[in-house]
Image: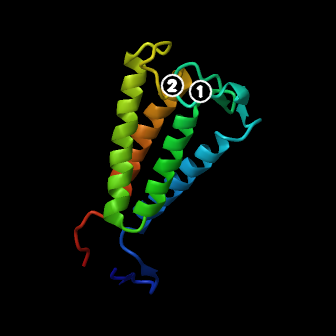
Amino acid sequence: MSERTSNQGVTRLPGRPVRLAALVVGIVFLLVGVLGFIPGVTTQYGEMQFAGHDSGALLLGLFQVSILHNVVHLLFGVAGVAMARSAKLAKAYLIGGGVIYLLLWLYGLIIDLESAANFVPLNSADNWLHLGLGLGMIALGFVLAPSGRSKR
C-alpha cells in the first residue's frame, strides 16, 4: 500500500475512510449478533427458535431474531472485519452487503410474515431496518471509496 503526504506533511493512506467504514459496520454486525444471544437484551429469549416465523425472541424488544438470524449477523460482521483490509474489498463489502440487505428488505415486504417463507425470521421493524442498512451501506461504499484518480 503506498502512502501519500499532504501539503501539511500528514501521511494519508489511500482508501482509509472506506476501510474504516467497513470495519465499523462489521464490528456493529458482530455486536448485534452477540447481543441477539443475550437474555434481557433479547426479550422473550426462551421463545427463540433456530429459524422460522415462530421464533418469538426480540432483539431490544423490537427486532425478531432467531439463532439463524443472529448467525447471519455474526457472519456479516466477520466479512466486514476481514474485507476492511483493502479499499477494494471494503467497497465490495459495503456495496454488495447493501444490495443483499435491499433484497432482504424486498423479500420481507413480499412474503407473508406468518408463513414458512419467513424462515430468517423478519418482522416489520426488521424490514425497515434492512432498508436503512442497505441504503446506508451502499452510500458509504460509493462516497468513501477512493476514486482511483491520481491527484497531483
Please tell me which residue is depicted at 51% across the width and 32% down the height of the picture: 129
Q: Residues within 10 Å of mark 1 (few under 14, many from 20)?
A: many
Please tell me which residue is depicted at 42% across the width and 77% down the height of the picture: 12
Q: Say whether residue 122 is left or right of residue 60.
A: left
The relative height of residue 12 versus residue 120 in the rendered view (above or below) is below
Q: In which quarter of the view is residue 149 placed?
A: bottom left
Where is residue 63? Give x, y as percent.
Answer: 60, 29
The relative height of residue 98 versus residue 21 in the rendered view (above or below) is above
The answer to whether one can see residue 145 in this image is no
Q: Say whether residue 143 is left or right of residue 41.
A: left
As drawn, the residue found furthest toward the bottom would be 9
Where is residue 99? Give x, y as percent.
Answer: 33, 40
As measured in the structure, the alpha-carbon distance from the residue carrying label 2 to the one carrying label 1 is 6 Å
Quickly name the residue at label 2.
122
Check the picture and name the quadrant holding the N terminus: bottom left
Applied colour scheme: rainbow
Quickly name the residue at label 1.
64
Where is residue 89? Give x, y as percent.
Answer: 34, 61
Pointer 2 and pointer 1: residues touching (CB < 8 Å)?
A: yes
The local secondary structure at tag 1 comes to strand
Q: For the residue marked with disc 2, what is the amino acid?
A: Leu
